[in-house]
Image (spheres, rainbow, N blue to C red):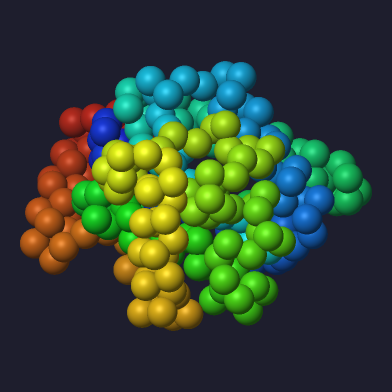
Amino acid sequence: MRIPRKYVIEPFTPFHKIWRCHNREFLLQSHAEKHAYLKCLHDDYIKKCSPDDFVIYGYNVMGNHGHEADEVRGDINSFSEHMRRANGLFGLNFNRRHHRLGKVAHDRPKTLRVQDDERLKNLMFYMDCNPVRAGIIKHPTDIRWKEFSSCRYYCYGEKNSYSDMLTEPEWYLKLGEDARSRQRKYRSMLDKFLIERGLKRDPKLGSGCFIGGELWEYEMKKKLSGLLNKNHRGGDPPDVV
């Protein structure tokens, strides 16, 4: 069942965005295609969006899927429209470049609401570790992944072609009084996460609608059930996001 995004995501709540290539094909395998996707994402955000609408905390692009850590700060529709434009343009250009027809993305991106800063922190570490789990690189800060992940930005303050679309989350700013101390702390925490969980996929971070504690998830699911029942009875117009 397709759940309307507006029932899950509320203003000033972080979330995990995931999208996969159609049939799990490795359409983003080459560096050129990763850059092509990130350019569509970056240019649309910089030219047509505002941090007042939503912010991007982090990203990581793999061979057949992409991750983001985001937060809506205004109307959810601004984020949805951004995704339609950026992903739609990438798909159109990809098909033109490769003389093909059909879907590039498997479906609309998943957006999983995150309970709090602690879960957001772990989500960003989880994203950083994706290419390590895939056996592509040995550490998330490997220079080969500099452009395709926000990891080196947070670890070393290194800027790349897309880092100007990033907003540093509140939990990161609290790690230290200056940039160097925050980067040092982030590297230490990331290494700890990598040792404890980085080589094992955590299914709770990529399925369902919510990421959080057991009681919080129960309350969110209960609220969602009520909204869906109301919509089924005709209380709200159908959601098209």
The residue depicted at 42 percent of the width and 24 percent of the height is: 51
Mark yes or no: residue 145 visible.
yes
User: Compared to 116, does 45 lie above or below?
Assistant: above
Q: Position of residue 68 (x, y in %)?
A: 48, 48
From the viewer's perspective, is 155 left or right of 76? right
Say which quarter of the image contains residue 90: top right
Q: In this orientation, which residue lies closer to the viewer: 226 or 95?
A: 95
Q: Quadrant of the N terminus?
A: bottom left
Q: Position of residue 119 (x, y in %)?
A: 27, 57
Q: Position of residue 235 (x, y in %)?
A: 18, 31
The residue depicted at 38 percent of the width and 48 percent of the height is: 182
Mark yes or no: residue 109 visible.
no
From the viewer's perspective, is 54 left or right of 158? left
Q: In this orientation, which residue lies closer to the viewer: 48 or 190?
A: 190
Q: Quadrant of the C terminus?
A: top left
The residue depicted at 57 percent of the width and 71 percent of the height is: 139
